[in-house]
């Protein structure tokens, strides 16, 4: 009892003394290059009246005592009870003696080499232990040098703490606050700048309260396994540091040899508690491992918790997902096939679909564009015998079908324009009034006059984009090299092949394709019984 009281008193005394910034500790370390001082702790009442002489001595190694005075070193200053170093260096290590009358005091000073890549010396640390969620406070106070201090900064792990002007930190401690906090005091002495550091090793510890340990996951776990395979049962818990986690794998007649308990793994949570997990590995599963309850338990002062894991054979359930899977695959493939078929049918019958759509929506492109004719027909006009068929096609077949049956209005120069006059101008203005240019191609097509029609139409189609060109290959033409280059820019599907024997019916592909390329039009004025009457207003053509 007595002894403890004494110790307490001593501690209190020490605290008071250090707070008065005198140096009570006998063994002291200092960091090379920093200002440093030794101050004798006087019991002031003793020497108040009588003036006494104060002497300082140093001894190091083999050297005996040497008295120190202001001339001993430019780095040393002495006044009253204080010996100051500006700054302290490695060779200042040694014993220091203070003598005042009959009182003496001595210290052992150890000067520590500065660490190259660090802002503090590891040997010169204060430590501070803070509980998580409690207040962490770091104050940069240096009462001895306070008057000389002209700037203080606070660093954590040698990095300056941003937004910290007062070099003062106060917050609720979290685990990531752990680290080395260095206060740097900037002092001016005789016009030179010195830095004094003070570093605190802050350790954050979990609080001392206890939680009731719990296991994660459901109470009872059924695990589907295949015989012969391996399985890992993962048991994890939230617990206190001292709580234990274990598996019960013992049967009446001992433990199965293929059951192994693995090492426990623990990690600290942000609340300072622990999360532990322990794997139970069962290799090469056999019948004996089935239907047995493998229990995992966590136990501690505050409670106990258990989870059960039971292995079941997988077969019982495996078929149903298999069926579903197969069925799903079949359905997916069927859908794919249907989609592909639809796309193919759509491509093959795209013309029919487009015509049907036109018919269905009663679309009419011809109402608002201000043009008179649906198409201008250009063909070889010279009446050599071999071109007789072409002439018949252009002047008879085309108008019969397009005009009388489908209600289009064609412009056929030979038929609709009286010969003579300014042919070229006339052709040009007629083409401008037409929505399509139908060119009936044959090998001998390129006579001068039709060439003009062709070029005029190409100009409209390609340059002004006002007109589309429809090419009808009347007699098989091997290559189109005799045509102007610009014609090759037209898409190949715009070229329709006339096959005299197959193309006669209105329902033939040729006419459908031609209709598809012609503008959409809803009027259907010419019935078969009216066939005799002219469908095209001749005088109107003349005047335009
Ligand atoms: C110091 O010691 C001397 C003798 O060694 C003694 O005469 C003197 O009284 C002492 N002084 C004090 C202040 O204790
Ligand atoms: C330092 O002082 C202690 C008593 O406080 C003493 O026992 C020790 O011998 C002294 N050391 C030296 C080197 O004088
Ligand atoms: C800082 O404190 C922690 C915990 O108390 C300790 O493990 C570590 O060694 C200390 N660092 C130094 C450099 O002494
Ligand atoms: C630091 O100094 C301030 C005033 O300058 C004082 O209020 C505070 O108590 C001091 N803190 C410490 C730990 O000395
Ligand atoms: C520190 O001292 C320098 C010169 O002695 C002075 O210019 C500067 O303003 C001082 N800074 C502070 C923060 O007192
Ligand atoms: C076991 O489960 C815990 C919690 O779910 C997880 O953190 C751990 O990584 C798992 N262990 C293994 C080996 O999967
Ligand atoms: C496991 O238990 C179920 C009933 O809970 C039973 O039907 C089955 O036969 C048992 N299997 C084995 C291998 O003991
Ligand atoms: C596991 O726990 C269940 C009930 O929680 C119990 O019936 C069973 O016997 C236990 N198994 C072992 C191996 O302790």
Image (spheres, rainbow, N blue to C red):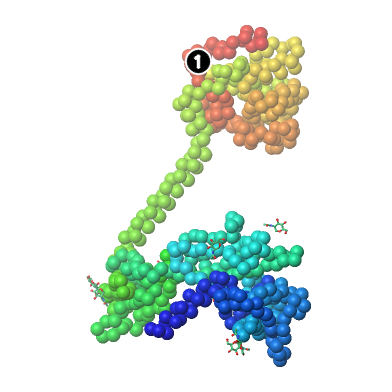
Q: Residue at x 77, y 78 (%)?
A: 71
- Where residue 226 sits in the image (x, y, percent)? 35, 72
Left or right relative to 425: residue 509: left
- Where residue 51 sits in the image (x, y, percent)? 65, 77
Instruction: Examine the image and state in which quarter residue 216 appears.
Output: bottom left
Q: Secondary structure at mark 1?
A: loop
Left or right relative to 397: residue 203: left
Instruction: Give the residue number, with chain letter if any, for mark 1.
Output: 525
- Where residue 432 sits in the image (x, y, percent)? 67, 19
Q: Nearer the viewer, residue 19 or 343?
A: 19
As displayed, is residue 106 above or below residue 449? below
Q: Nearer the viewer, residue 330 or 183?
A: 183
Specify the farthest residue to the bottom. 62
Residue 306 visible (yes or no): no
Residue 150 visible (yes or no): yes
Q: Residue at x 62, y 85 (%)?
A: 102
As displayed, is residue 8 above or below residue 461? below
Q: Residue at x 49, y 33 (%)?
A: 353
Q: Residue at x 57, y 75 (%)?
A: 44
């Amino acid at each position: 009892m007595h002894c403890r009281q004494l110790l307490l008193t001593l501690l209190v005394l020490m605290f008071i003394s250090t707070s008065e910034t005198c140096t009570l500790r006998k063994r002291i370390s200092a960091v090379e290059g920093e200002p440093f001082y030794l101050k004798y702790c006087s019991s002031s009442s003793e020497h108040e009246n009588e003036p006494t002489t104060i002497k300082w001595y140093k001894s190091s190694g083999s050297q005996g005592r040497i008295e120190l005075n202001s001339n001993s070193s430019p780095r040393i200053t002495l006044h009253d009870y204080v010996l100051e170093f500006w700054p302290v260096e490695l060779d200042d290590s040694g014993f220091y003696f203070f003598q005042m009358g009959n009182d003496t005091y001595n210290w052992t000073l150890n000067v520590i080499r500065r660490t190259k890549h660090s802002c503090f010396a590891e040997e010169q640390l204060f430590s501070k232990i803070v509980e998580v969620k409690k207040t962490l406070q770091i104050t940069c106070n240096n009462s001895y040098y306070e008057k000389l201090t002209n700037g203080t900064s606070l660093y954590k792990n040698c990095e300056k703490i941003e937004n910290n002007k007062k070099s003062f930190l106060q917050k609720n401690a979290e685990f990531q606050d752990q680290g080395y906090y260095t206060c740097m005091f900037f002092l001016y002495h005789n016009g030179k700048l010195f830095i004094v550091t003070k570093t605190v090793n802050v350790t954050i510890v979990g609080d001392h309260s206890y939680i009731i340990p719990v296991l994660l996951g459901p109470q009872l776990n059924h695990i589907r396994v295949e015989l012969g395979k391996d399985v890992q049962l993962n048991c994890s818990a939230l617990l206190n540091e001292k709580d234990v986690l274990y598996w019960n794998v013992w049967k009446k007649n001992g433990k199965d040899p293929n059951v192994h308990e693995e090492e426990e793994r623990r990690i600290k949570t942000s609340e300072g508690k622990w999360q532990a997990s322990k794997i139970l590995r069962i290799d090469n599963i056999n019948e004996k491992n089935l239907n047995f309850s493998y229990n995992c338990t966590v136990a501690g002062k505050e409670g106990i918790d258990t989870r059960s894991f039971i292995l079941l054979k997988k077969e019982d359930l495996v078929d149903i997902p298999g069926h579903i899977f197969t069925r799903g695959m079949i359905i997916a493939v069927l859908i794919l096939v249907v989609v592909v078929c639809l796309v193919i049918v759509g491509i093959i019958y795209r013309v029919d679909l487009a015509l049907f759509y036109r018919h269905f929506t009663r679309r009419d492109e011809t109402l608002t564009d201000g043009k008179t004719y649906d198409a201008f027909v250009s063909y070889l006009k010279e009446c050599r015998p071999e071109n007789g068929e072409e002439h018949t096609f252009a002047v008879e077949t085309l108008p019969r079908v397009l005009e009388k049956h489908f209600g289009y209005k064609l412009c056929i120069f030979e038929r609709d324009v009286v010969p003579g006059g300014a042919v070229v101008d006339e052709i040009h203005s007629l083409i401008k009034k037409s929505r399509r240019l139908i060119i009936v191609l044959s090998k001998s097509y390129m006579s001068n006059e039709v060439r003009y029609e062709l070029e005029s139409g190409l100009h409209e189609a390609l340059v002004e984009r006002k007109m589309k060109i429809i090419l009808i290959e009347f007699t098989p033409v091997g290559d189109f090299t005799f045509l102007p280059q610009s014609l090759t820019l037209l898409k190949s599907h715009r070229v329709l092949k006339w096959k005299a024997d197959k193309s006669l019916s209105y329902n033939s592909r040729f006419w459908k394709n031609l209709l598809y390329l012609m503008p959409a039009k809803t009027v259907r004025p010419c019935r078969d019984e009216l066939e005799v009457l002219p469908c095209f207003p001749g005088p109107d053509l003349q005047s335009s």
